[in-house]
Amino acid sequence: MVVRTITGDAAVAYAAMLARAEVVPGFPITPQTVIIEQITEFINDGIMDADFIPAESEHSVMSVAVGASAGGVRTFTATSSQGLALMYEMLFAAAPSRLPVVMAVANRSLGAASGIWTEHNDSQPVRESGWLQVYVEDNQEALDMTIQAFRIAEDHRVMLPIMVCLDGFILSHVVEGVDIPEQSLVDSFLPKFVPVNVLDPKDPFMINPVTPPEFATEMRYQQDRAVEGSKLVIAEVDEQYAAVTGRRYGGLFEEYRMEDAEIALVGAGTWTGIAREAVDQLRAEGKKAGLIKLRFMRPFPGEELKRATAGLKGLGVFDRSAAFNGYGPVFTETRNALYGSSVPITDHVAGIGGRDITVDVVREMYDIVERNASGEKVRECTWHGLRGEQR
Amino acid sequence: MYEIRFHGRGGQGAVMAAQSLADAAVRSGFHAQAFPYFGAERRGAPVQAYARIDTKKVRTKSQVYNPDLLVIMDESLSELADIAAGLKPDGRVVMNTTKRPEEVDLGKGVDAVCGTVDASALALEVLKMPVVNTSMLGALARVWDVVPLESIVEAIEDRFGEKLGTRAGILNGEAARTAYDSTIIGRTLGRKEYGKLAEWAPAWNEIPIGNSLRSETRDGVAVGPASSSQNLTGRWKWSTPRYDREKCIRCLRCWWSCPDSAVIRLDDDYMRWDMDHCKGCGICADICPVNAIEMVQGAHTW
Ligand code: SF4
Ligand code: SF4
């Protein structure tokens, strides 16, 4: 075990190396670029045995990833924002073909108004592509989850691609001390990739040929069940990883000071660390505040969240992007999951386009949740730090 | 509401026929719709088209399962499958055949009013082309009098005229009139027992992961989606490639280019043809740089 002070991007690159990724197609885009650069250095230095394939666009990157994975090799790539958008079509080829590609997404605001700063409006819109999605809180988790991602994706009960989402800049370009596990330890945790379908000219067959209406419903349902079924595997893998590294993340979500909590927030990404601070302050002031760190958007832990929040007097949801239906996507999913629950629930949009989130901003969220819990009329969705009156 | 189902082969104009019938119905004061079975269109492949006619707005958008009228544009289709399936008890049939209605057998229990017409011969005579759709519409008007022949001819003249020129419009109208006059009315036989076609209707958890279909499996090749061994595309052909081994320079281009993998590469790089699957498209003949492949009219098995 070595502790190195490295960026989130570098942590992900170390993970891809330790996981023995064999093919890495790539195309540069800020704030992901460091991941791919670091990997090419590892390869150049002779410490990583992988083929790096520079493609002419992200669409080609994902096409190469699909081809490599269908060829039976462990495949890794990384992207951000417009790069992910350009991959869109091929994301929908990877998932139904059940190819366990692992991709890091350094979250960055997508589209106009152009920004390089973090926002979840690049990865949230593709949560219906059939990929699994995990959001991480710090550089250590970025490394750990990239390693775990291979184990989850390649499990024959899953066989689905997975995105490891880390906030751009806030993680990708921030250095933290990261425990880099020994190669032998990672090898003992992560077995060799055993593909289900391997394209081989000597044994020709088809993956996803033209699928007429007579078969499409069944095939989609199978995909739907595979995503749902991954919940079990995610929990198992979390335990197995804890057994070798001592680090446990809680699977689909982590509960922080939730035992006797009355008010709580749920949300994903680096915001969670700031929210922990806010919870501690509130607890010190005698308020029964708790936090649910949402880790997976897919599979979405609907039933599980409903159970975990059942005793609350108020719940708030943090969204780092808008869904333009008046609410953010995490809220839309959470409230849907909590249908029938009596817990009052509010949405809290913040950190858009990389705007900084402070402990005070999170406390403002808890304040609204508390007032909502006590029966006061509050806005169902609040954009925090918005200049001008919210309508 | 009346529902009409057309059975033909790609290239025979089943869709144009259904659209023209809907057009004629609208002209005579009805509400109507027409549409094809949505899928890949391939010349010679069995196709279906549908029309609905009603005195009020047609709202449904589903396919036709219980037709009032069945239009069979290619006789050989009734040998392959039970195409009269779902025909209403008092439903009627129009068929392109040289047979008399009493000789037409569309399966056990199908004792239906039937009009037969040799539309293929008639189209060749009037249009100088084997495109039977307009003749079939004329015959249809004779068997089923809901939409009058005059509206049908009018719709044909307009639609075909617009697409192929005024003269072609008039000729096609003429084909419809001639077919109307030469249609023989009777009843079908209703004796034949159809064998059940092998089918693969897997439950969701029976589909191989990644929807992958392997060549050694029955599901992958015999009956699954995109399978072809049961689907003898060779039956579609109107012309056949003839290979001249003497001229062949073994460039492999025909082998690469055949869309149905019907050109088979031998160990010495000369070619052999799988006539069960060659559909006669002519691509191989077109691509051959030394004219070693010639397309010959008719279906042959050399
Ligand atoms: S005509 Fe030639 S290209 Fe076309 S299906 Fe037959 S063999 Fe193939
Ligand atoms: S394209 Fe012509 S010359 Fe080339 S292999 Fe085929 S038949 Fe022979």
Image: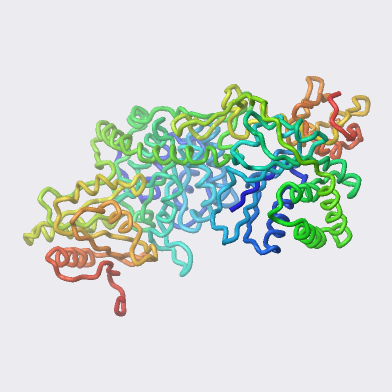
Residue A240 in view:
yes
Depth order, front residue of A116/A162: A162
Q: Quadrant of residue B218?
A: top right
Q: Quadrant of residue A167?
A: bottom left
Give the farthest residue toward the front. Answer: B186
Q: Quadrant of the C terminus of chain B?
A: top right
Give the farthest residue toward the bottom. Answer: A388
Residue A151 percent coordinates (x, y): 38, 34
Residue A45 in view:
no
> Image quadrant of ligand 1?
top right
Q: Is residue A186 above or below residue A57?
A: above
Residue at image point 52% right, 31% down: B201
Depth order, front residue of B103/B22: B103
Does residue A97 appear left or right of residue A227 in this picture?
right
The way the protein has been coloured in the rendering is rainbow
Q: Is residue A343 above or below residue B231?
A: below
Q: Is residue A146 above or below residue B169?
A: above
Depth order, front residue of A361/A327: A327
Q: Quadrant of residue A207?
A: top right
Residue B87 percent coordinates (x, y): 61, 40
Residue at image point 93% right, 28% down: B247
Depth order, front residue of A79/B278: B278
Residue A238 percent coordinates (x, y): 28, 37
